[in-house]
Amino acid sequence: MEGAHARHMQLDTVTTAALDAATRADLLRLLDAAYDEPMAEYVGHIGEGLHLLGRVDGQLVSHLMVVPRTLGLDDRWLHTAYIELVATDPTWQGRGYASHLLQHCVPLLREFDIAALSPSDAAFYERRGWLRWIGPLGVRTSHGVQWIPGEEAMVLPLAGTPMPLDRTRPLTIDDRPGEVW
Ligand SMILES: CC(C)(COP(=O)(O)OP(=O)(O)OC[C@H]1O[C@@H](n2cnc3c(N)ncnc32)[C@H](O)[C@@H]1OP(=O)(O)O)[C@@H](O)C(=O)NCCC(=O)NCCS
């Protein structure tokens, strides 16, 4: 959703490797406040990607990041833009900032086959065009695929997404420490 507030937000993209120390600290403060828990360990597990930073008058107010991952769907490997750490500083929420970042990250995803994420509030993303995955979700480990009952994922089809997309099929993701989806 575009709002009057969001139009005043400056957007900046930066890779994890290129984040300077001050921005890293600002980002961790924002994440700790938004999720109301210490996020450093989770951030470490996610690995590197591309951050979309939203600032108002120089202050970091909203963030998301794109982590390259690989989804397995039937006999296809999908180069996936996995969206992580969608967060707005609590004092700046409800002004359209996260919606603005979600909308403005899409042109950054041209190299990917599909976008995906694991929602804590699926309805928020559904209202922004994301689709719930209906089929079983699994993780590809060195011991084979482990299915994760109760896991939730959503996808956003991109230009390169194989169509028709059957969301009732099993979907697997590459392994990582911590929360895999
Ligand atoms: C979820 C989260 C990222 C949303 O950030 P946000 O910047 O407040 O998001 P937005 O302002 O774009 O949208 C939030 C709501 O405010 C409403 N809103 C948007 N602009 C508004 C405005 N100018 N005035 C009032 N409300 C507005 C939107 O309609 C939206 O409601 P909807 O989903 O019913 O449509 C934020 O609440 C957060 O950081 N939560 C904790 C971290 C988290 O759980 N992240 C993962 C979410 S699955």
Image (cartoon, rainbow, N blue to C red):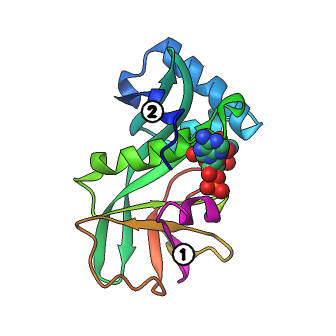
Residue at horizontal 71 percent and vertical 29 percent from the top: 91
Q: Which residue is mark 1?
A: 137
Q: In the picture, which quadrant includes the C terminus?
A: bottom right
Q: State yes or no: residue 130 in magenta.
A: yes
Residue 81 percent location from the top left of the image = 37, 54
Residue 55 percent location from the top left of the image = 49, 23
Quadrant assignment, res 28: top right
Q: Nearer the viewer, residue 96 or 29?
A: 96
16 lies left or right of 46 = left
> Measured along the vertical axis of the image, is residue 73 above or below residue 155?
below
Q: Residues within 10 Å of mark 1 (few under 14, many from 20)?
A: many
Label 2 sits on what residue type?
Arg
The numbered disc on residue 87 is: none
121 lies left or right of 43 = right
Q: Which residue is mark 2?
A: 7
Please name which of the two marks, 1 or 2, marks the residue nearer to the observer.
2
Region of the chain picked out in magenta, as a range: 122-140
Residue at horizontal 50 percent and vertical 50 percent from the top: 1
Q: CA distance from mark 1 to mark 2?
A: 37 Å
Label 1 sits on what residue type?
Leu
Q: State yes or no: residue 113 in magenta.
A: no
Residue 177 seen: yes
Q: Could you say whether the residue bearing mark 2 is in a helix, strand or loop? A: helix
Q: Earlier in the sequence, mark 1 or mark 2?
A: 2
> Measured along the vertical axis of the image, is residue 72 above or below residue 50?
below
165 lies left or right of 58 = left
Residue 43 percent location from the top left of the image = 57, 37
